[in-house]
Amino acid sequence: MKEVPAEYFNGKFQEFQDKFPGHFSKFLFSKLKKCVKDTKEPHCPLYRVKGTPVVAVVARKDYLLTLDSLLVKFIELEEYELAAECRDLINECQINQVIRESKGGSG
C-alpha cells in the first residue's frame, strides 16, 4: 500500500493537485476498479499516512458517489476514455449493488 507523508496534509496535497491535475483522480480510479471487482471487501484501501496507523479508505457504500465525482473530474480534464471507463464501472457497481440487495445484503 502506498504511504503518504503526514506533512502532505498541511497544504502540500493541494499543491500537488494543482500542479498535477487529475493524477490523484487516476490513482483513486485505479484502486476503485480493483475494489469494485472484489465484491467481498467492505471498503477500498487507498493509502496509509506514513508514521501513523491511519489508512484512507472508500467505504463500499460510497463507491457510487466517488465514481460519480471521478466521472465529472475526468470530463472536466477531457479524459474521455477514462470517463467512459468510469461510466462502465458505475454501471457494474450498480449491478453489484442490486445483486447484493436481492440476496439480502447491504451497501
Image (tube, rainbow, N blue to C red):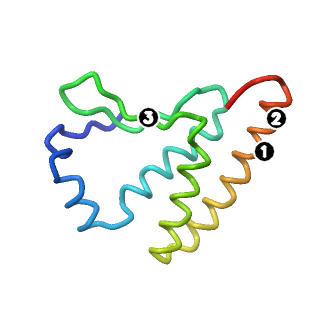
Distance between the Cα atoms at labels 1 and 3?
A: 22 Å
Residue in the picture at 50% in, 35% down? 44
Q: Secondary structure at mark 1?
A: helix
Q: Which mark is residue 99?
A: 2
Residue in the picture at 60% in, 36% down? 61
Q: Amino acid at mark 2?
A: Ile
Side of 93 where 77 appears, left or right? left
Of the 4 image quadrants, the one containing the N terminus is top left
* Frontmost residue, 24 versus 106: 106
> Pointer 3: what residue?
57
Percent across and percent down for residue 41 are 59, 27
Asked if residue 100 is positioned above or below residue 87 in the image, the reply reads: above
Of the 4 image quadrants, the one containing the C terminus is top right
Asked if residue 106 is positioned above or below residue 96 in the image, the reply reads: above
Tell me whether circle 2 and circle 1 mark residues in contact (CB < 8 Å).
yes
Side of 50 where 84 appears, left or right? right
Q: Amino acid at mark 3?
A: Val
Q: Secondary structure at mark 3?
A: strand
Asked if residue 67 is positioned above or below residue 105 in the image, the reply reads: below
Tell me whether circle 3 and circle 2 mark residues in contact (CB < 8 Å).
no
Of labels 1 and 3, earlier in sequence is 3
Q: Which mark is residue 95?
A: 1
Percent across and percent down for residue 75 are 53, 73
Residue in the picture at 58% in, 67% down? 83
Q: Residue furthest bottom?
A: 78
Side of 9 where 35 appears, left or right? right
Q: Amino acid at mark 1?
A: Ile
Q: Secondary structure at mark 2?
A: helix
